[in-house]
Amino acid sequence: MSTHRCYSPWLRHLHWLIALFVTGALVLIEIKGWFPRGSASRTAVKWGHMQFGVAVLLLMLPRLFVRLRTEVPPITPPLPRWQAAMSKLVHLVLYVLAFALPLLGVAMMFVAGKPWNLLGIPLPVAAVPDGALARQLHDLHETAGNVFLWVAIAHALAAVFHRYVQRDDTLQRMLPPERGAAR
């Protein structure tokens, strides 16, 4: 498939960088339980999770801008209508959750009133903490995170399915072009 068209280099780079940071955030929050409550290690893991989450939010802004300004390369051969509709729905859910999860995390930290930072820069907290609201936001953040994990896994499995079962160029559009291939 040397003649496939790819997404723009910016979009491809942002896609894989965001995927890396999402993976980092998920891994860190999953291993948090390995460390005793109140330990420096557990605090460091939670801090890393927050840094990755905010990085995802910051990277999603240019990604959305670039995505809205660039054409989606066609899939060859074209997908059945139901697959194209499912693809759009999955991408919409991924985009919404990639924005919502970090925003929920930021809101949770703000209303909890606990000091926190982004790469050492202190971030604002509510003057009057609201523990009940912080717990509700935490629960919503956690549930949305689980949904995001499963939708992202489905997204990745669908890309592999398209590559090896349907044998179309869905996955190749997001990979770097092969040397000498049309760009």
Image: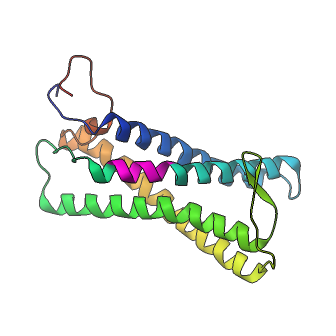
Frontmost residue, 95 versus 139: 95
Can residue 26 be spotted in the picture? no
* Residue at 32% over, 42% down: 160
Instruction: Give coordinates of residue 119: x percent, y percent.
Output: 72, 45
Q: Indicate left or right for 36 with 89 as reference.
A: right
Image spot of residue 100 (x, y percent): 51, 66
128 to 155, vertically: above or below: below
Q: Please give the range of residues in magenta.
A: 59-66
The answer to whether residue 69 of the structure is visible from this angle is yes
Closer to us: 88 or 31: 88
Q: Is residue 134 magenta?
A: no
Query: Which residue: 43% across, 54% down?
Result: 152
Name the image quarter holding residue 12: top left
49 vs 128, left or right, is left
Query: For this view, does 98 lie left or right of residue 180?
Result: right
Say which quadrant the C terminus sits in. Answer: top left
5 lies above or below 22: above
